Image (cartoon, rainbow, N blue to C red):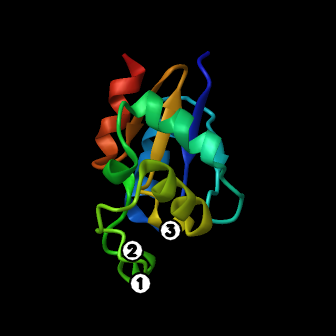
Amino acid sequence: MDKIKIYHNPRCSKSRKTLQIIKDNNYCPEIKLYLEEAITVEELKGILEKLNLEPRDIIRTGEEAYRINSLDDLKYSNNDLLNFMVDFPKLIERPIIIMNNKAVLGRPPENVYKLFN
């Protein structure tokens, strides 16, 4: 069976629903509680590559750390944004699901079905 990993925040309803869909499809995912377990810049780069997205595509603009650090300012490079996400993991959109060399954002949770095909 394919390995599946979810970057999960149990306080997030979308993340919980996505995890339930994974389990309902008979997968036993590796669960990374990214708010409690450190995430690295290299790990984020790998995730973004699998998602085929840029850092700004997975940054949560409604978070306090986004406002306080004025992350809407285009002066920040992708590496700057990645470092902010490492320092303030709440900035990372959730959930992110990885299966083999593909990944999806679980927004909406049904996006996870794209990995099962």
Q: Are marks 2 and 1 in contact (CB under 8 Å)?
A: yes
User: In the picture, which quadrant includes the N terminus?
Assistant: top right
Residue projecting furthest to the front: 75
**Residue at left 40%, top 49%?**
55
Disc tally is 3
**Residue 71, quarter of the rendered image:** bottom left
**Residue at left 35%, top 80%?**
67
Q: Are marks 2 and 3 in contact (CB under 8 Å)?
A: no
Q: Is residue 37 left or right of residue 50?
A: right
**Residue at left 42%, top 47%?**
18
Q: Which mark is residue 55?
A: none
Residue underneath mark 2? 66
Residue underneath mark 1? 68
Q: Earlier in the sequence, mark 1 or mark 3?
A: 1
Neighbor class of circle 2 (other Cα within 10 Å; few <14, some 14-19, many 20+) is some
Residue 47 on image: x %, y %? 51, 37
SS class, disc 2: helix
SS class, disc 1: helix
Q: Earlier in the sequence, mark 2 or mark 3?
A: 2
Disc 1 and disc 3: Cα gap in Å? 13 Å
Whether residue 10 can be seen here: no
Residue underneath mark 3? 90
Whether residue 93 can be seen here: yes
- Residue 63, placed above or below residue 30: below
Residue 46 on image: x %, y %? 55, 33
Please name the amino acid that badge 3 sits on: Lys
